[in-house]
Image: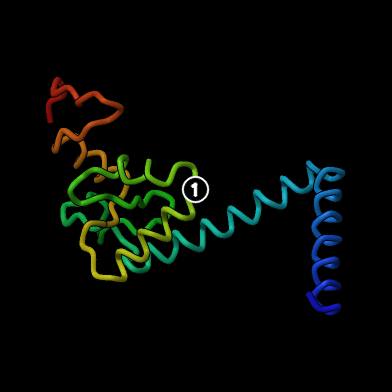
Amino acid sequence: MTDKETKAEELKKYKREWNNKWRKEHAEEYRKIQRECHKRLLNKVKNEIFSLLGNKCNDINCLVKGRCRDKRCLQVDHVNGGGAIERRKYGSNVIKYWRSVIEKINSGSKNYQLLCANCNWIKRYNNNEVRRGKRYKSTITK
């Protein structure tokens, strides 16, 4: 290793040690910064997905006039079900999961759609989609 590379490695090591020390001494502040950063990144990624999927409920029978456009109640739905299985592949890494969804949509996948929460639950009920190993009971009438 050259003298220049050695100094660069030492600087990297010093910065890493200093950052680790600061994180330990300011643990609460660090967690707060991390949460804020994660929230901003998650919103950015979800907004990108929403815009790729049209920013409105995809159900033509949506009860909201002109279809729901409120991002607070829009949900990404797997057209053919199976979303829980797909999410489990990524564990707790939500950002990585949403980025994979973006890649699939950009590559032409039609497996995703936006539905408002109401339309999504109606679809799940009508299709008898599984939730935590149990099927919905068809005791409710329309």
Give the quadrant of the C terminus.
top left
Rendered residue at 72%/52% (across/down): 33
Q: Dot 1 corresponds to which residue?
A: 93
- Is 84 situated left or right of 110 in this image? right
Tally the numbered discs. 1
Which image quarter: residue 3? bottom right
Residue 118 location (% of width, % of height): 28, 43
Residue 38 location (% of width, % of height): 60, 53
Which image quarter: residue 82? top left
Residue 97 location (% of width, % of height): 42, 53
Give the quadrant of the N terminus.
bottom right
Q: Residue furthest front?
A: 1
Q: Is residue 130 above or below residue 96?
A: above
Rendered residue at 17%/48% (across/down): 80
Residue 43 or 60: which is nearer the viewer? 43
Residue 16 location (% of width, % of height): 80, 57
Residue 116 or 142: which is nearer the viewer? 116
- Is 54 situated left or right of 1 in this image? left
Mark 1 packing: few (<14 Cα in 10 Å), some, or many (20+)?
few
